[in-house]
Image (cartoon, rainbow, N blue to C red):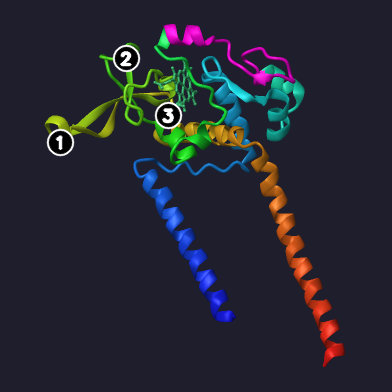
Amino acid sequence: MTKRFAKLIIASLLALVAGSAVAAGAGAKLEASHVNIDDRASLQRGAALFMNYCAGCHSLGYQRLARMAEDIGVSEAQAMANLNFVGVGYGDLIGTAMTAGDGEAWFGKAPPDLSLVARRKPGGPDWTYTFLKSFYVDESRPLGWNNRLLANASMPNVLWELQGSARPIYAGEGAGVTIERLETVSPGALDAEAFDRVVRDITTFLTYVGEPAALKRERMGVWVLLFLVGFTFLAWLLKQEYWRDVH
Ligand code: HEC
């Protein structure tokens, strides 16, 4: 009995290890975002950054402004004044002013809805984090920008004033040419560390948007664990009580 139990535990541990190895393999070229959706200040900064720099093109079609304000801890007045660049009602979904047709005409591709982007991309939030840090100058592209992670992306580097601009340093020859790294050509308003924080905040916000319930679930998890511990103790007391009669 105990042997079988031990085997079961070992098997589950192995499955866990294998699972994380696969996940790590899929995101091999991605940078770790280290997002923490419980970091409320980061969430609030990320929401403001998103509304400033992204909402003009991207919608969050499953997210209501009111729910977001409540979850990240800002009042209705603050949300309407500072987080509502697209002019939706407080109870409305966060759309974008841009129509799909305009998006296609202007960028060759309509900017996709970003509600679930932090979940559906391989590597999860790390994909978005890396994507936002991977833009480089490319005069052959219509808007003058390309992206190392998403080759020939039709999105321009909307954060270039903060980040500065970079050019690619190539390695290899012929068909095997790859971009080895990006080199800054002109610095932006922020240094590398501050820019990383901006990108992390936006990614944190998009991670929350991808699963708003995760905030509550994580907070509830602690209580569930405490309950289980308490219940186990009660069950143990009960067992002592029963077995006293048996002995
Ligand atoms: C000027 C319009 C515009 C702005 C502003 C903009 N984007 Fe984009 N974005 C696009 C377009 C167009 C695409 C489609 C790129 C492609 O697939 O070639 C895109 C794609 C993306 C993708 C990939 C989505 C997917 O499903 O493949 C992410 C992530 C993204 N944008 C994040 C952001 C974030 C975060 C901001 C704000 C910092 C932002 N974008 C601002 C136009 C924009």
Question: Which of the pair 87/228 is nearer the observer?
Answer: 228
Task: Indicate if the residue with disc 3 has its beta carbon within 8 Å of ligand 1.
Answer: yes
Residue 13 visible, this orientation: yes
Tell me the amino acid under the disc marked 2: Gly
Specify few, some or many for label 3: CA neighbours under 10 Å numbering under 14, 14-19, or 20 or more: many
Residue 94 lies in the magenta-colored region: yes
Q: Position of residue 233 (x, y in %)?
A: 77, 72
Q: Calculate the distance from the C-alpha at mark 1 to the C-alpha at mark 3.
A: 25 Å
What residue does disc 1 label?
172
Specify few, some or many for label 1: CA neighbours under 10 Å numbering under 14, 14-19, or 20 or more: few
Specify few, some or many for label 2: CA neighbours under 10 Å numbering under 14, 14-19, or 20 or more: few
Numbered tag placed on residue 66 in the rendering: none
Q: Where is residue 207 in the image (x, y as percent from the top left)?
A: 56, 36
Q: What stretch is highlighted in magenta?
A: 82-105
Q: In this view, does 187 lie above or below 232?
A: above
Numbered tag placed on residue 132 in the rendering: 3
- For the point 53% across and 42% down, which residue is it? 35
Tell me the amino acid under the disc marked 3: Leu
Q: Name which of mark 1 and mark 2 comes first in the sequence.
A: 2
What residue does disc 2 label?
144
Classify mark 3: helix, strand or loop.
helix
Q: In this view, does 73 lie above or below 158?
A: below
Q: In this view, does 243 lie above or below 28?
A: below
Question: Which of the pair 181/228 is nearer the observer?
Answer: 228
